Image (cartoon, helix red, strand yellow):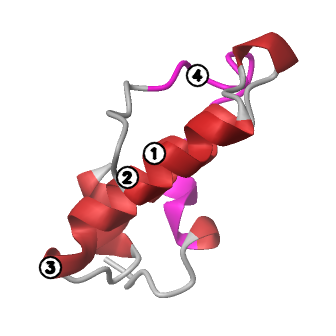
Amino acid sequence: MGGLMIACGIEEKDRGMTERMAKIALWCIQYKPESRPLTSIVVKMLEGLDEIPTPLSPFPFLSVEASNLRSICPHGEEQ
């Protein structure tokens, strides 16, 4: 995830919060509804009261190639 944050121009001081929000988002978009957290748990995660485990791959049949990061992050610089 660090490479994606760099490509998107996210500053070092904001990376912890960015990773936290991304993990919460990935939990909320799980393909199987039963894998998604309850709203009350999401609120606790957002408030920092609950630990956020590493999410499962929400759509295991899809993958993003590293070369496509520029299309995902418009602020990425050409290399």
Disc assigned to residue 57:
4
Question: Callout 1, which amino acid?
Answer: Met
> Please, what secondary structure does the residue beneath circle 2 have?
helix
Q: Disc 4 or 1, which lies upstream in sequence?
A: 1
Q: Gap between marks 1 and 2, in whole Å?
A: 8 Å
> Please, what secondary structure does the residue beneath circle 1 have?
helix
Q: Gap between marks 3 and 1, in whole Å?
A: 20 Å
Mark toward the viewer: 4 or 3:
3
Mark toward the viewer: 4 or 1:
1
Q: Are marks 1 and 2 in contact (CB under 8 Å)?
A: yes
Residue 62 drawn at (x, y percent): 72, 27
Residue at image coords 25%, 76%: 14
Q: Disc 1 or 2, which lies upstream in sequence?
A: 2
Direction from residue 18 to residue 16 in the image, left or right:
left
Q: Are marks 4 and 1 in contact (CB under 8 Å)?
A: no
> Please, what secondary structure does the residue beneath circle 4 have?
loop
The relative height of residue 10 versus residue 55 in the rendered view (above or below) is below
- Determine which residue is flagged by label 1: 45
Question: Callout 3, which amino acid?
Answer: Lys
Q: Gap between marks 4 and 1, in whole Å?
A: 19 Å
Mark toward the viewer: 1 or 2:
1
> Please, what secondary structure does the residue beneath circle 3 have?
helix
> The magenta stretch spans which residues?
55-70
- Say few, some or many: other residues with alpha carbon within 10 Å of mark 1 (under 14 / 14 to 19 / 20 or more): some
Direction from residue 17 to residue 11 in the image, left or right:
left
